[in-house]
Amino acid sequence: MEDLELIASMTKQEMDAAIKHLEHAFQKIRAGRASTTMVQDVIVEYYGAPTPLSQVANVMVPDAMTISIQPWDKTAIGAIEKAIINSNLGFAPMNNGENIILNVPPLTEERRRELSKLAKSEAEATKVTVRNARQDGMKELRKLDGVSEDLIKDEEAKIQELTDKYVKMCDENFKVKEAEIMKV
C-alpha cells in the first residue's frame, strides 16, 4: 500500500513541477508591460565569471514601458550592456554612465501572435511532461509484485484523474496568458 501511495505522490510532484515550470516560462513572455522578469535570465560576464544580472545590479520598473538597471559596480555597465544585447531580448540598452535604461516598445499585432504561439508551445510541452509523468507512474505500478490487480487499477484511475486535472490547468494557464498577450 505504501508503494502505491509513494508512486502516486511522486507522479503528483512531477506534475506540480511541470506546472511551476510553465508558470515561470509564462512570466518570461512579455505581455506589453515592462517587467523585471524579462531580464531575470540575463547572464553577465562579471570579473570572468558568468553571473545573473540580479546579482550585479538593481533592476527596477519605473513605468510600464521602461526597465532601469543600476549596477552596484559602475565598471560593470559595459558587461551588462553586452549581456543584454547578446541575450536577444530585442531591447537596445541606453547607458547614461550610471544606469542602463531599456525602453520596452509596444507590441505589434504580429509580435503578439508570435508570443501567443510561443506560449502555446510552452503549454503543449508542459502537457507532454505531465503525460510522461503519468506514463512513468503507470510503469512503476505495473512493476509492483504482490499487489492485487484491483488496487493497481484504482491507483491507475487516480493517476489518470491527476493527469486530466493538470492538463486542464495547462489549458487554463494558457488561456489567461493568451488573453494577457493579445490585450492591446
Image (cartoon, rainbow, N blue to C red):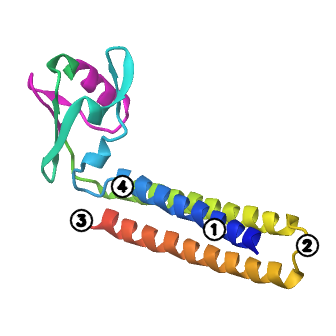
Mark 2 neighbour class, 10 Å CA radius: few under 14, some 14 to 19, many 20 or more: few
Question: Mark 3: which amino acid?
Answer: Val
SS class of the residue under badge 1?
Answer: helix
Please give left or right for residue 151 compared with residue 121 in the image.
right
Q: Position of residue 24 (x, y in %)?
A: 41, 54
Location of mark 4 (residue): 27
CA distance for labels 3 and 1: 42 Å
CA distance for labels 4 and 3: 18 Å
Marker disc for residue 9: 1
Mark 4 neighbour class, 10 Å CA radius: few under 14, some 14 to 19, many 20 or more: some
Decide: marks 2, 3 in contact (CB < 8 A)?
A: no
Location of mark 3 (residue): 184
Residue drawn at (35%, 34%), measured in percent from left and top? 42
Looking at the image, tell me whether mark 4 or mark 3 is earlier in sequence order. 4
Looking at the image, tell me whether mark 1 or mark 4 is earlier in sequence order. 1
Q: Position of residue 149 (x, y in %)?
A: 88, 81
Question: Mark 1: which amino acid?
Answer: Ser
Marker disc for residue 146: 2
Q: In the picture, which quadrant includes the C terminus?
A: bottom left
Question: Mark 2: which amino acid?
Answer: Gly
Observer-side mark, 3 or 1, equals 1
Observer-side mark, 1 or 4, equals 1
CA distance for labels 4 and 2: 46 Å
Q: Position of residue 104 (x, y in %)?
A: 21, 45
Q: Position of residue 30 (x, y in %)?
A: 32, 53
Question: Mark 4: which amino acid?
Answer: Gln
Residue drawn at (58%, 63%), measured in percent from left and top? 13
